[in-house]
């Protein structure tokens, strides 16, 4: 049994529209720069430490990667650190609808 949930793009959109969600992109920098979910932050060691220091363990965290595999490992890791509402985006960035709002424009 995992301590995180895998959610669809539709479920993620509903969550994002109902409350503040920290969206974490676990892909590489080049992929992030090429396009990412609006409001997403690149996950790196310093950000992980900052999230731990903030101590907002009830705030929802949504992880995504390319296709939804690497984000599962990160979601599980953060759940083990004590975050209570952790989600991994099913099918990752490839499953995020490009035709709808929520995709940050390419720079």
Image (cartoon, helix red, strand yellow):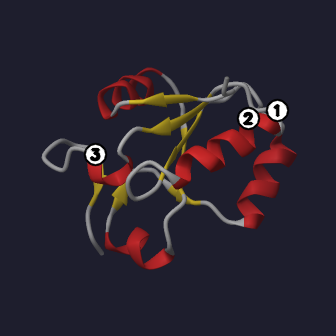
Q: Residues within 10 Å of mark 1 (few under 14, many from 20)?
A: some
Task: Report the residue marked by disc 3.
Answer: 95
Mark found first going from the N terminus, 3 or 2: 2
Residue at left offset 67%, top offset 23%: 1
Position of 99 with respect to 34 (left or right) is: left
Q: Element type at marker 1?
A: loop
Residue at left offset 82%, top offset 32%: 82
Task: Report the residue marked by disc 1.
Answer: 82
Give how far apart the Cα atoms at labels 3 and 1 are: 28 Å
Quadrant location of residue 50? bottom right
Task: Report the residue marked by disc 2.
Answer: 79
Q: Is residue 10 among the parts visible in the rendering?
A: yes
- Residue 63: where, in percent of width, then height? 53, 45
Mark found first going from the N terminus, 3 or 1: 1
Q: Element type at marker 2?
A: helix
Is the residue under label 1 in contact with that under label 2 (CB below 8 Å)? Answer: yes
Q: Is residue 24 among the parts visible in the rendering?
A: no
Give how far apart the Cα atoms at labels 3 and 2 are: 23 Å
Q: Which residue lies most toward the front here?
A: 1
- Residue 10: where, in percent of width, then height? 30, 28
Front one among 91 and 100: 91
Position of 16 with respect to 86 (left or right) is: left
Residue at left offset 49%, top offset 65%: 27
Give how far apart the Cα atoms at labels 2 and 1 are: 5 Å
Q: Is residue 73 above or below residue 36?
A: above
């Amino acid at each position: 049994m995992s301590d995180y949930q895998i959610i669809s793009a539709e479920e993620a959109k509903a969550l994002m529209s109902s409350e503040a969600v920290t969206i974490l992109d676990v892909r590489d920098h080049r992929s992030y720069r090429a396009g990412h979910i609006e409001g997403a932050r690149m996950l790196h060691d310093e950000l992980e430490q900052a999230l731990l220091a903030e101590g907002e363990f009830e705030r929802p965290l949504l992880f995504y990667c390319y296709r939804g595999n690497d984000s599962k490992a990160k979601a599980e890791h953060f759940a083990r650190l004590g975050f209570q509402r952790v989600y991994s985006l099913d099918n990752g960035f490839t499953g995020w609808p490009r035709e709808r709002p929520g995709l940050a424009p390419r720079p």
